[in-house]
Image (cartoon, rainbow, N blue to C red):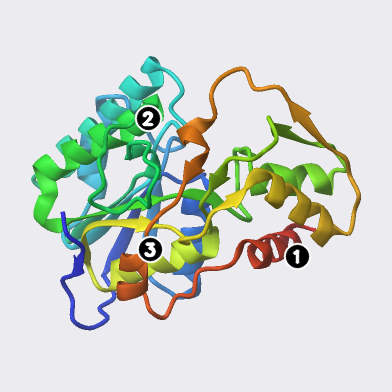
Amino acid sequence: MTFSFLNSFIKRPKRVVILGTSGIISTNLQKKLKKKKLNFIKIGKKNIDFKNKKSIQFLKGKIKDNDFIIFISAEAPAKNLIMKKNNILICQNICAAIEKKNFSHIVYISSDAVYSDIRYKIKENSATKPSSIHGKMHLRREDILKSYFKNSLCIIRPTLVYGPGDTHCGYGPNRFVNFTLKNKEITLFGNGEEKRDHIYINDLILIIYKCILLKAVGTINAVSGKVYSFEKIAKLTNKIFRKNNSISKLTRSGPMPHNGFRPFDNSLIKKHFKEIKTTKIEEGIKKYISLIK
């Protein structure tokens, strides 16, 4: 799926429906829509269990004509086959609920985990043969959505997301910032030498917001185009906090994820989101710290 905008000018949808309410992406998107005074509702597990067949009728009663749908809901990260199955069921139920609805558009928040491990920069058309359960889950959900809504679907594949609102404390900036804030030691796997792309949450939200206003279709990677080692990020975090907390290293129990190198080509972001200057890792960590201190 190539990427483009259906709208040639900004058009605010009548209403945005956010499926998934509690994660870093959803909570920050809600803040953005509220700030922009864009009408939205959020539906999550506090309202209904999307794995339950009852959610189909529930959503049919909630979705209105011309609604713009943001599909974020997931059991993430998917670590086992049960979680994979649950996530696919969530997707199937949501599709069953909205397939005959006259909604406006749908944006699915996927993951860069769908891509194969390669040694050169990953593009939107790079091979998608993921080795992880999480990647396979997202790829299957993408295929299901395409089979229903190809002409009104935008798929956004973020790389590792960091910033305020994080709920997972995942390895990388989120964990390092939170541990340093609590005067806890940062622990690296191996020497922390693997290099990954990270995107600051505000940048991702700006991308999603423009996709809403201009009705994006196709697939795009939400990436910075830069890679940093986890060791460098850990040291940067200490430096910004002006602390000398020790950084320990754990012997790896398995191979480095993605062969230790995961760079992305950000040409599409530069082409279609010229007004968005992706945040450099040091600046992003500084912003993150200033907001949670």
Q: Amino acid at mark 1?
A: Ser
Judge from the rendering whether residue 33 lies leftward or rightward of residue 228; answer left or right: left
Q: Foreground mark, 3 or 1?
A: 3
* Mark carried by residue 49: 2
Give the quarter of the figure containing the N terminus. Answer: bottom left
Judge from the rendering whether residue 111 lies leftward or rightward of residue 66; answer left or right: right
Q: Amino acid at mark 2?
A: Asp
- Distance, label 2 to label 1, CA atoms, is 35 Å
> Which residue is pictured at 68% across the width and 30% down the height?
190
Image vertical order of residue 270 relative to residue 140, above or below = below
Judge from the rendering whether residue 132 lies leftward or rightward of residue 213; answer left or right: right
Question: Which percent across, then down, holds residue 89?
Answer: 27, 26
Give the quarter of the figure containing the C terminus. Answer: bottom right
Image vertical order of residue 116 relative to residue 287, above or below = above
Q: Name the residue that disc number 3 marks.
A: 266
> Which residue is pictured at 42% across the width and 41% down the height?
44
Asked which secondary structure carries label 2, the reply is: loop
Compare residues 10 and 247 and report the one nearer the observer: 247
Asked which secondary structure carries label 3, the reply is: loop
Judge from the rendering whether residue 112 lies leftward or rightward of residue 214; answer left or right: right
- Distance, label 3 to label 1, CA atoms, is 27 Å
Q: Name the residue that disc number 1 marks.
A: 290
Question: Which percent across, then down, holds residue 159?
Answer: 45, 49
Asked which secondary structure carries label 1, the reply is: helix
| Dot placed on the residue nearer the N-terminal end, 3 or 1 | 3
- Distance, label 2 to label 3, CA atoms, is 36 Å
Q: Foreground mark, 2 or 1?
A: 1
Image vertical order of residue 257 relative to residue 223, above or below = above
Compare residues 244 and 52 and report the one nearer the observer: 244
> Which residue is pictured at 23% across the width and 40% down the height?
142
Q: Amino acid at mark 3?
A: Asn
> Which residue is pictured at 30% across the width and 31% down the height?
90
